[in-house]
Image: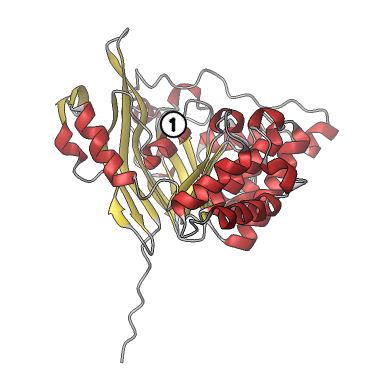
Amino acid sequence: MTEHMTTAAPLLKIEDLRTYFYLQSKRAFIRSVDGVSLEIAAGKTLGIVGESGSGKSITALSVMGLISSWPGVISGKIEFTSNQVQKNFLDSLHNYVTIKKREGMIMDVNKDVIGWEQHSERMMSKVRGKEIAMIFQNPKSSLNPFTSVGRQLSEAIRLHTVVKNNQEARERALYWLDRVKIDSPQLRYDNYPYGLSGGMCQRAMIAMALACEPSLLIADEPTTGLDATIQSKIVELLAELKSELSTTTMLISHDISIISRLSDSVAVMYGGSVFEFGPAKDVLSSTHDAQHPYTSALLESIPTVQKITEKGYLQAIEGDVLDTINIPAGCRFFSRCTRVTDAIKEKCEYREPPLREIASGHKVRCWLYFD
C-alpha cells in the first residue's frame, strides 16, 4: 500500500500582485508593487527587506485591504487559508476595474472606487483585526489619542474575540500588557498614548495585535523611530513571543539584523519586485556563493565588528533607488549593479530576468544564474 503525502497550503499566498498609483502631475503610474509573488507557511516568519521605496509596506497594506487611493490594487491574488477562513481577498474585484494595456504595459485604469471599496470591506470586515493583525511603524499615531491604552485594548478584545464582558475584557487586556512586559500594567491601562514613551506605545500595539490571537501578524518596521536600546528590547520581545506563540508573521524591515534574527525565510524586494526569496540562512549569509548582487550589496553595507575593528569603510550602493514610474526594459538593478559581465550585459539591459529557483526553495531574479 502506497502512502500519499500531502503538503498543507500556505497560510498566505500572494500571486502576481500589482498595486499602482496614478500620479496626476506626470500622468503616469507609480508601480509600487509590480508582480509580487510570496507565500508564508503556518507558524513561520517571512522577513521582507529592501531599501525605502522598494514596495515592502505597500505589499503589507494590500494584504490588509488598506489601499484606497486611486487606483490601488489592480490585479493578482491574495489567498488566505486558516482554520476559520479560506478566501482570495481580491476575488471579484476585477469586476470593478477596466484596464487598458499597450505592449503588455498598463496605460489606463477605470475604476468604480465606491463599488470596489464596499466589496473589499465586505471581504475584509471579519478578517482584519481577528484573523490578520498589524503592528504599524508609528505606534503613537496608530493609537487613538483620546482614549486610554487599556480601553483601546479592551475594545479590540471585545470586538474580535469571544470575550464580551467588560470586566473580563479588562482582565484580558491587563494580561497582555503584562505579557509584553509593560511595567505597572494596572497604571498603564489608564494612561493615554501621549503619556507613554514610544517603546511603551509599541508594546501596547503588540499587545493589541496579539490579544485577538490572529492567524497572521504583520509587523511593519516595528522598531522605526525608537532609540537603539529600546529597539533591542522590542526585538527581544518579538523573538520571545515568536518562540512561545508560533504566530505566522510577515516582518518588514530595512534592518537586516532584525530580519536575520527573527525570520525563517526572506524576500528581498527592489523596485516593487521580489529579487530573491529563500531560507534566511541562505539569503542573508555573507559567505553564501549564490546571491543576487543587490542582496550582496545590502549585506556589504551593514556595519560589523570586523569592519569596525579594522576601521574599514562601509560599502555603499552606488546610484539611486529605482524610480518606479520609469521602469527599464531589463533588470531593474542594472544601472547600480557591479557584477554585470560582458556575456550577460545585453540581456541585463534589455530583458527582465524571471525569478528562478537555483536551489531547493531558493529563488533569484538574475541573469548570472542562467545557463
Write the residue at 21% across / 39% down. Answer: 93
- Residue 290 in sight from this viewpoint: no
Q: Quadrant of residue 192?
A: top right
Look at the picture and state if 249 lies above or below 328.
Answer: below
Q: Position of residue 171 (x, y in %)?
A: 63, 56
Q: Which residue is mark 1?
A: 55
The residue under the point 33% across, 28% down is 68
Q: Is residue 136 left or right of residue 62?
A: right
Q: Secondary structure at mark 1?
A: loop
Quadrant of the drawing holding the N terminus: bottom left
Q: Quadrant of residue 32?
A: top left
Amino acid type indicated by mark 1: Gly
Name, please, the residue furthest toward the bottom: 1
Horizontal and vertical percent position of residue 57: 47, 33
Count the numbered circles shown: 1
Q: Residue furthest right?
A: 309
Q: In the picture shown, does residue 120 fall above or below 265?
A: above
Residue at (48% x, 56% y) in the render = 164
Q: Position of residue 79 (x, y in %)?
A: 32, 51
Question: Is residue 184 in view from this perspective?
Answer: yes
Q: List x then y, in percent, for residue 97.
A: 17, 31
